Image (tube, rainbow, N blue to C red):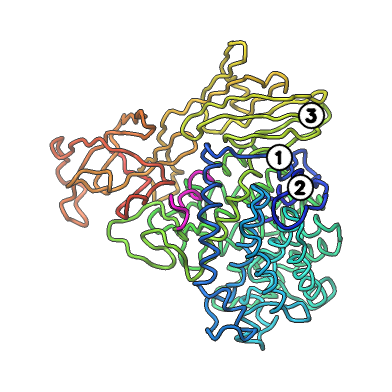
Amino acid sequence: MTHLSFAQECCVLDQTPAAIRPAPALPVVRLSSGLHPLDLSAVTLHPDGALGAWQELNASETIPHCIAQLETSGVLDNFRRLLGESEAPHRGFVFADSDLYKVIEAVAWEIGRSGTSAHDAWLDEMIALIARVQDPSGYLHTWIQGVHPERKFTELHWTHELYVLGHWLQAGIALARTAGCTDLLDLALSFVDLVDRRFGPGQEDGIPGHPEIETALVELYRHTGEQRHLALAQHLVDQRGRDILPGGGFGSRYFQDHLPVREALDPLGHAVRQLYLNAGVTDLFLETGEEALGAVMREQWERVHTRKMYLSGAFGSRHRDESFGNDHELPSDRAYAETCATIADLHWTWRMMLAGDDPRHGDVIEREIHNALAASVDETGTCFFYSNPLQRRPDRFDEENAPAQRQEWYSCACCPPNIARTIAQLGAYVAAVREDEHGATLELLQHAAMSVRLPPEVGSGTLEVETTYPDSGTLHLSLSHLRAAPGARLGVRIPGWVRSGTVGTADGAERALSPAELTAQRLELALEEADGTTITVDMPPRWTLSHPRVDATRGCLALERGPLVHCLEQVDLPDGVEVDDLRVPIGADPAVREDGMLEVTLHHRSDDGELYRSRDGPATSPKENPTVTVTMTPFACWGHRGDGAMRIWLPRER
């Protein structure tokens, strides 16, 4: 897969899935950093925990929904019409084939997670369809083949041929790793060979307008051990910034083709393209150790996450070109914040975590999973946001893939299948193993209810983590059948928002988290001592300020608790009170109700209708500022009870 949790693509299944054929024995890839992924079957997210329940919903509702939508949206007819089996015209964008490949990848990771055989017949049908449509040369792109064959490989900036191939490769690798089925990957390899002959080192100039294939090629190298695939990925990256792509009306920055990669310090242009490219470049760094790539990725990561990330973990402030804006340009109501951008950053930040020891990587992944990504799908698992604004005005209309409510599908349907494949492999992001001269450490990177089979470096046995996180900050740890390796340890990430907490041992002793542990954002225990340990991080509600250069939210506050960003929805307000008329008074003290919801008392100041008024006008009297006690909802759940105004950032009283 690569795309999602490069962790999962690097592993061996120690259990035999119920579908297709036994998985081949493949070694876990060891990267150049001290942190390495666990194998695919090592982590099981508990279905009674937040993330495990999400995986169950994804399996029972989201994946079947995506499969059904491939029919109704015309994606499969685009293949069949090339065989004379459908008279329908081509439907969807030029890259619609990628929807099929992403759904196949989601099914593959679900096979690896649960061993399901529910989709075996469908997989057989899809792989056979792909094989029948593929050109003898290896080429396959239904829009080119069926609509504009004269454009084959002539408009790489716009036709997404290599982007689609990247998703095909990821689906093929996922099936090979989880189900032992190599048929789809074998078909994709013939297309890779064609691309290598045409655009590989020493051949014709050509790079994809939409990055994605780069990280897939690196994973193909990891899977096959064939150096040529790594060389092709390197070549495609090295060619950027040489004016190969025509900018057209979009300009070279839109395509990340304005500078050579090693000189491009600023994240620019189409946000998803930039973040996918960065994931591929970081993959190259992890394999080659080239410090120039590592340095530019560290600088870009810093700029993306300290200047251009929304509080929700979303990216892309402009509807035009679906792009990053300027530094600190983060409008809430006009945020584009495409779901795929959050997923792409999740891919990239995971790789950056493998490449270094910055504790902020885990914080960003946590913020993304529990906020922007969670908000992108509803509680049924079948309706989705493409764009994820942080404020909805009461008079907002649907526009530019930014509807007022979640939709079952989109004409540009990149996000729903992306969500499905991401959630199927969430377990790959929560734990890893670290090795150094002192021994091996099992690292818990995210707080979740889970079972972790200890990696051989650490020993043998199973770690159980019981928690209701993110509703509470308490983790109960237990170990069964433990045989610890010499020097084996357990590391637990302490989120950056934590200011206090406790560690309790099996014998009843308790201590506070130390200042050093809070600063390092990490608690370390000898593995034998972890059994029976209870870790509690305190989760009081907290008001958050934005950087003073973020004009859109200057003078506003946002309410957070633990990893969750909260918002105010019109549905929770009494008649006559509008979301946009509420202010945070000085000293406002949010409270946690028994049901876990947050409650806070705000000032209500209705507007008199004047668009502009004199600064020297009469001051507002107390009678005009009645108080209203309101419920604040986790942003992840907004819109579940119908449409209406919503906002995260609330103006504060001066």
Q: Position of residue 623 (x, y in %)?
A: 13, 36
Q: Amino acid at mark 3?
A: Gly
Mark 3 lies on residue: 459
In this view, 486 is above or below 10: above
Mark 2 lies on residue: 11
Q: Decide which of 321, 398 is in the foreground and name it.
A: 398
Q: If you read the primary sequence from the N terminus, does the residue marked by circle 2 or circle 3 appear first?
A: 2
Total numbered circles:
3
Q: Amino acid at mark 2?
A: Cys
In this view, 451 is above or below 242: above
Mark 1 lies on residue: 42
In this view, 467 is above or below 187: above
Tell me the quarter of the picture where residue 181 sits.
bottom right
Tell me the quarter of the picture where residue 3 sits.
bottom right
The structure residue drawn at horizontal position 32% and vertical position 53%, both measured from the top left corner, is: 642
Instruction: Using the numbered discs, state the Cα–Cα distance from disc 2 to disc 3 in whole angstroms.
Output: 18 Å
Label 3: few (<14), some or many (≥20) within 10 Å?
A: many
Q: In the rendered structure, are the residues bearing label 1 and label 2 in contact, judged by CB atoms less than 8 Å apart? A: yes
Q: Is residue 133 visible?
A: yes
Q: Quadrant of the N terminus?
A: bottom right
Q: Decide which of 619, 233 is in the foreground and name it.
A: 233
Q: In the rendered structure, are the residues bearing label 3 and label 1 in contact, judged by CB atoms less than 8 Å apart? A: no
Tell me the quarter of the picture where residue 172 sits.
bottom right
Q: Position of residue 301 (x, y in %)?
A: 63, 49
Give the residues drawn in magenta, as a range. Answer: 367-382
Answer with left or right where residue 437 lies relative to residue 471: right
Q: Is residue 368 visible?
A: no
